[in-house]
Every structure is written in structure tokens, then in C-alpha cells.
Amino acid sequence: MKKYSLHIKFLSLTLLVIFLFGFASRRNAHKTINHIDVIFENGDNLFISYEMVNKLLIQSLDANKNKSKENINLNSLEEFVQSNDMVENAEIFLSLNGDLGALITQRTPILRVANGKESYYYDKQGIKMPLSNNYSARVPITSNELNSENCHDIICMANKIKNDKFLNKQIIGIRQIETNGKIQFELTTRMGNQIVIFGEFKKVDEKIKKLKVFYQKSISDNTLENYKSINLKFENQVVCAKY
């Protein structure tokens, strides 16, 4: 009898837990969204503000922030937020207390196009970004007119500059030149204001190493300001032109 009593108590407790869980789940599903928590994964909200993300989410909720959680399509919210040109990725989720959370990855600009006709950024994936009213990125500028057919090499060059600590500080401009059907590059420097004749996007690491050695030597000799151009196209040497 005692054994049956224990089984009955255990079964009753199990049913009670299931009932409470189901009741809580149903009650939670009918709760409304009272707060939107926006988190920027890659630093501060430089190009798109918290308010802008909130506005996008509210618009996607049919302009009704108090919509019940059971009627929210998180995938649809993510797609809508990611449609913004400043957003690389968005992850939308519901917290346990009923708040709506948004984990936002902004696009990372690596190059600015300013050619007199238009002005915009390219991000690290080679996707166009509009300029932002919130923040101006310190990235190299090009005056080239770029399109989907001729932007590949310059995006590769801009990514190389972005990912190299020395070049990221020193290179402020990129010019793409086509000679005999080959794409070549000229870079403009911040310190010394020289033109770096880089040539084709080949033997890139070797050329960068030569440039760094040249700068180290010329800075120690206090001769950097004497040069107007630095040519890296020749094998195992740096050829410079003086003022």
C-alpha cells in the first residue's frame, strides 16, 4: 500500500509540474513585447543607431511594439533588419522575461569611393554601403569609377590595407590604373604624402615588406620628406624619385 501511495504522489507531482509548465508557457506566449534590447556585436553603433534598429523592428511588427509573442515571426524580423544597407547580419531572439533582443553586426567599410559623380563605401565583402550621417569611417579613398566588373582587385587591395596595422594607418588613397589590360595600383601615403607605385596585385606581402623596410630606414635617417614616389614594382629593390 505504501508503495502504491508513493507512485500516486509521484504521478500527482508530475501532472502538477506539467500543468504549471503548460500554463506558464501559454501565459508567456500571450505576453506582449514591452522592451527591445539592441546589441551591436562589432563595437559601437557607428553607422546605424539604436533608434534606427528599434524603428526597423517596430515597422516589421506592423508598427505595434505590443504585439503578442506568439504572433512574432523572428525570421521575418531578421530579414527585414538585414535589408538595411548598414547591416551585415541580424539575429533576433526573445528573452525569458518577454523582451525582444537584436544582435546586430554592422558592415565594415574598407574603401570610400568619391569620384565627383557619387560617393559611397565598399565593405570588406565588396558590397556597397551608403555614407552615414552618424559616422565617417577613416578608410582609403579612391576616385576611380567602380562597378561589379572592375572592383574585385581594388577590394582585395583595400582589405589588405585594412588588415595590416601599418598600412591601415599610413595609406589614405588608392588609385587603380589599367595598363595594357593589366590592373595596377598607386597608393597615397599619410606620412610624407608620397605616391607608392605598387603595380599589380601580385607578390603583395613581398612588396609590403619592402615598403616597411624603406620607411623604417628613411625615418631613422630623417630622409622621408625627400621622396615624392616609392616604386615597389622591381624585384628585391625599392626605387624612389626625389623632389
Image (spheres, rainbow, N blue to C red):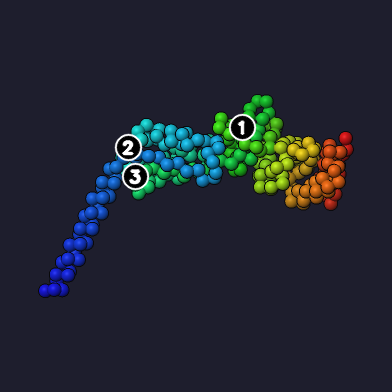
The furthest residue to the right: 242
Q: Residue at x 77, y 51 (%)?
A: 209
Q: Nearer the viewer, mark 1 or mark 3?
A: 3
Q: Amino acid at mark 2?
A: Lys
**CA gap, disc 2 and disc 3:** 11 Å
**Residue 167 x/y as whole percent:** 71, 44
Q: Using the image as rendered, state which of residue 147 and residue 41 is in the foreground.
A: 41
Q: Which residue is mark 3?
A: 98
**Viewer can see residue 131:** yes
Q: Residue at x 45, y 41 (%)?
A: 38
**CA gap, disc 1 and disc 2:** 37 Å
Q: Which residue is mark 1?
A: 120
Q: Amino acid at mark 3?
A: Gly
Q: Residues within 10 Å of mark 1 (few under 14, many from 20)?
A: some
| SS state under label 2 | loop
Split into 4 quadrants, where in the image is the C terminus?
top right
Q: Amino acid at mark 1?
A: Tyr
Q: Nearer the viewer, mark 1 or mark 2?
A: 2
**Residue 141 x/y as whole percent:** 68, 35
**CA gap, disc 1 and disc 3:** 39 Å
Q: Residue at x 67, y 25 (%)?
A: 116
Q: Residues within 10 Å of mark 2 (few under 14, many from 20)?
A: some
> In this rendering, would 116 be left or right of 40?
right
| SS state under label 3 | loop
